[in-house]
């Protein structure tokens, strides 16, 4: 049920108009179209403010920039890491729940929690990096990402990568796309301390500090709740990239105010300015 205050008064009290969902659906087409157009205009204005107000753009890597595991799945990577732990006689480090989630970063955090700053954790991270490097040749570029990066760079906007992936992997991928020059040296990825992975804002703060940028003048482009949390903690405006309904729902439920399904409208805004 939707309640809307009316300007008229009866018996000294404001009256409320109560409309059912059915009544809303049967509202005149022109009225529904007008509401829809107003909503779309508000979204467009929000996007315009974020995009054109950014002097520095911090990109998450896997998702907004490319699909790293498009041809070499994350589940396969997790399987390789499971096998390595088992051969070391360390399979009991992981719970059944952790084994059921084929997320390499979940596994890294699990190992690090139980063996913080150990040689084992360092070796595990190195093996994860090698698996990510294997995925680079079959990674799929995100639609419109390459021209968007080049356009922002040409306009003098500072660009950085802030990711939970290895910076070595990011550098390798960007080199294959001839994009490294748009970002280098500002590649801030996974360190030897997994506690500093997003949602911790460590990599964002490193980027802002190195680029001499105030958080309010930056923009984070990310596709996960951990990206949003890191941006919020760093005080950086956030643009969500939800390439499907599931991703979009996760971002909006986490509190993302502006989410795009494609980078095309972002690129169009830059071309129009």
Image: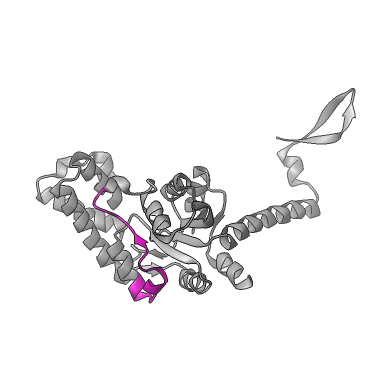
Q: Is residue 235 visible?
A: yes
Q: Is residue 109 left or right of residue 84?
A: right
Instruction: Tell me, yes or no, whether the highlighted magenta stretch contains residue 192.
Output: yes
Question: Residue 231 or 210: which is nearer the viewer?
Answer: 210
At horizontal 45% and vertical 55% (from top left) the residue drawn is 223
Residue, far top: 11
Q: Compared with residue 206, is residue 16 higher up or lower down, i.e. above or below? A: above
Q: Position of residue 17 (x, y in %)?
A: 80, 34
Q: Position of residue 225 (x, y in %)?
A: 44, 47
The residue most toward the bottom is 178
Q: Which residues are magenta?
A: 174-193
Asked if 195 appears above or below 4 in the picture, the reply is: below
Pinpoint residue 19: horizontal percent, then vertical percent.
Answer: 76, 37
Whether 271 is drawn above or below 235: the answer is below
In the rendered image of this protein, does residue 141 appear above or below residue 29? below
Question: Is 144 positioned to the left or the right of 53 in the image?
Answer: left
Quadrant, the N terminus: top right
Image point 34% across, 75% down: which residue? 176
């Amino acid at each position: 049920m939707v309640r809307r205050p009316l300007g008229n008064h009866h018996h000294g009290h404001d009256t409320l108009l109560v409309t059912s969902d059915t009544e809303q659906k049967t509202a005149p087409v022109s009225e529904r179209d007008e509401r829809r157009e107003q909503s779309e205009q508000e979204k467009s204005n929000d996007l315009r403010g974020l995009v054109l107000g950014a002097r520095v753009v911090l990109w998450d890597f896997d998702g907004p920039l490319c699909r790293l595991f498009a041809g070499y799945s994350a589940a396969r990577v997790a399987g390789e890491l499971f096998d390595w732990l088992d051969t070391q006689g360390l399979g009991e480090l992981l719970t059944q729940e952790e084994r059921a989630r084929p997320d390499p970063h979940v596994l890294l955090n699990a190992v690090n929690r139980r063996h913080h700053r150990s040689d084992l954790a360092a070796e595990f991270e190195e093996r994860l990096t090698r698996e990510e490097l294997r995925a680079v040749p079959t990674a799929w570029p995100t639609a419109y990402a390459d021209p968007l990066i080049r356009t922002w760079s040409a306009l003098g906007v500072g660009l950085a990568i802030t990711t939970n992936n290895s910076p070595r992997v990011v550098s390798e991928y960007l080199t294959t796309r001839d994009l490294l020059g748009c970002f280098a040296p500002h590649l801030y990825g996974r360190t030897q301390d997994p506690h500093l992975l997003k949602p911790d804002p460590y990599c964002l703060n490193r980027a802002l500090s190195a680029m001499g940028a105030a958080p309010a003048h930056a923009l984070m482009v990310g596709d996960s709740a951990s990206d949003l949390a890191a941006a919020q903690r760093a005080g950086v405006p956030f643009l969500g990239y939800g390439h499907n309904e599931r991703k979009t729902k996760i971002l909006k439920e986490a509190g993302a105010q502006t989410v795009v399904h494609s980078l095309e409208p972002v690129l169009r805004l830059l071309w129009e300015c």
